[in-house]
């Protein structure tokens, strides 16, 4: 059974990862420094980010287009309260459900945080599965609100905008899909249906930007009588598997990623 996208991946080894991060700290660089963790949903990005942030006394920047929304917790699989207490996270719970979030907004916010942390001698950890956000950040897109044309520092110079370690987590298809299926069951066990009911009860529109996310739109259909609960769970699992394929297809173009195979 080959990895989902047949990446040339080394075995996941936390000691080797930590050694690489330590080397990044010790090596002088004229550029700001960054550690990035990407990969498909359910691959373990958040767990690795928290482990590294604790070990190196730094902070995490979320690169997840759904985690920005307040009160959308279960369906987005946000870090738990305990995890948020252990490590400071940025770009989580910053918007209301009807607000839109774009690559430009992400870049503006993330760059300020990166500069601040580097100025304090810390290397921030960016973790998330929104490929456009991560690629734009590490490659140095020059984008402005309202503009569809932008330039890339990486394409112009052949050098990443940051002195960055970019790790990608992948797995055999069977393993990744099993993790996704178990994640889906956990979402519903943790109260996804009640979360959506409560969101609607507070006046959030079914057409809100945040309600379009995987898990939320399928649960809305269930609550509106359009599917059984079992069918809804199956739809969420399938949608998540399809999303994982799209994520890995996107990350495949980023040839500077160091792929690590989880088991």
Image (tube, rainbow, N blue to C red):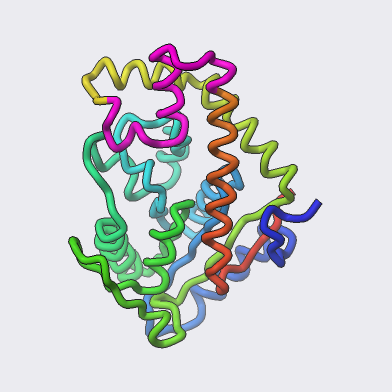
Report the side of 216 relative to 141 (left or right): right
Looking at the image, the residue that sits furthest to the bottom is: 157
Residue shown at the point (81%, 51%) measured from the top left: 1
Image quarter for residue 132? bottom left
Q: Classify 176 as above or below 136.
A: above
Q: Position of residue 4 (x, y in %)?
A: 69, 53
Please say whether residue 183 is one of the residues in the magenta stretch. no
Q: Position of residue 144 (x, y in %)?
A: 21, 67
Query: Is residue 82 at all visible to an observer of this figure?
Result: no
Report the side of 111 relative to 17 (left or right): left
Q: Nearer the viewer, residue 75 or 85?
A: 75
Q: Position of residue 240 (x, y in %)?
A: 55, 39
Residue stretch rendered in magenta on the structure: 206-232
Residue shown at the point (53%, 13%) measured from the top left: 228
Report the side of 33 relative to 110 (left or right): right
Looking at the image, the residue that sits furthest to the front is: 226
Q: Position of residue 122 (x, y in %)?
A: 40, 65
């Amino acid at each position: 059974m080959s990895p989902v996208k047949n990446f040339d991946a080394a075995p996941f080894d936390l000691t080797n990862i930590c050694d690489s991060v330590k080397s990044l700290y010790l090596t002088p660089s004229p550029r700001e420094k960054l550690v990035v963790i990407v990969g498909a949903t359910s691959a373990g990005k958040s767990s690795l980010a928290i482990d590294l942030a604790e070990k190196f006394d730094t902070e995490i920047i979320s690169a997840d287009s759904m985690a920005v929304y307040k009160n959308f917790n279960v369906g987005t699989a946000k870090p738990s309260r305990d995890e948020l207490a252990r490590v400071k996270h940025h770009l989580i719970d910053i918007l209301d459900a009807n607000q839109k979030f774009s690559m430009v907004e992400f870049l503006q916010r993330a760059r300020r945080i990166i500069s601040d942390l580097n100025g304090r001698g810390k290397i921030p950890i960016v973790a998330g599965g929104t490929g456009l956000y991560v690629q734009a950040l590490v490659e140095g897109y020059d984008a402005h609100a309202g503009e569809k044309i932008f330039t890339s520092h990486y394409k112009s110079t052949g050098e990443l905008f940051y002195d960055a370690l970019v790790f990608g987590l992948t797995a055999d298809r069977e393993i990744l899909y099993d993790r996704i299926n178990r994640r889906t069951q956990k979402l519903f066990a943790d109260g996804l249906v009640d979360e959506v009911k409560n969101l609607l009860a507070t006046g959030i529109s079914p057409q809100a930007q945040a309600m379009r996310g995987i898990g939320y739109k399928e649960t809305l259909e269930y609550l509106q009588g359009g599917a059984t609960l079992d069918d809804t769970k199956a739809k969420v699992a399938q949608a998540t598997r399809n999303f994982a394929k799209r994520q890995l297809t996107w990350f495949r173009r980023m040839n500077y990623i160091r792929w690590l195979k989880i088991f």
